[in-house]
Amino acid sequence: MININEVREKMEIYDIVIKLIGPIYPAGAEHIDEKRYNNLIVMINLAEKILDDIREVATNKDKVEYSLNKAGKAAQLFLDEQKGYNE
């Protein structure tokens, strides 16, 4: 079984995802960019799923249980910080 801590030491999770999905930035060459466009769609779908998971955790921000509240507040803070990111 893979020890995730050992993997993290050797490669960041982002780097792993990029290696699995492939580059997403267009190169300006049609024969390359179709694949990169497909990679982008996969990356968008992954980002949407991750954001859905974070939104779900954020629903715990008002819970009385410490660990639920702590996770919920961290998730909500992240979501609040993303508002206006694209402005």
Image: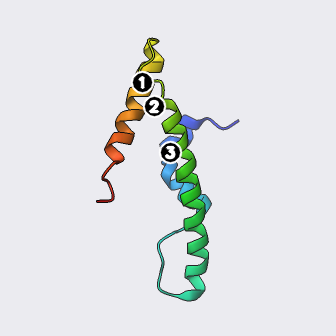
Whether residue 31 is situated above or below residue 4 in the rendered picture: below
Mark number, residue 17: none
Contact check, label 2 and label 1, Cβ < 8 Å = yes
Q: Position of residue 11 (x, y in %)?
A: 50, 49
* Residue drawn at 32 percent across, 54 percent down: 85
Q: Residues within 10 Å of mark 1 (few under 14, many from 20)?
A: many
Disc 1 marks which amino acid?
A: Lys
Whether residue 33 is situated above or below residue 65 in the rendered picture: below
Separation (CA) of disc 3 from disc 1: 16 Å
Pick the residue in front: 86 or 26: 86
Taking the image as shown, residue 46 lies to the left or right of residue 59, namely: right
Residue assigned mark 1: 61
Q: Position of residue 19 (x, y in %)?
A: 57, 60
Q: Position of residue 40 (x, y in %)?
A: 54, 66
Specify which label sits upstream in the sequence, 3 or 1. Answer: 3
Q: Position of residue 17 (x, y in %)?
A: 56, 54
Specify which label sits upstream in the sequence, 2 or 3. Answer: 3
Residue assigned mark 2: 58
* Residue drawn at 40 percent across, 21 percent down: 70
* Residue drawn at 44 percent across, 27 percent down: 72
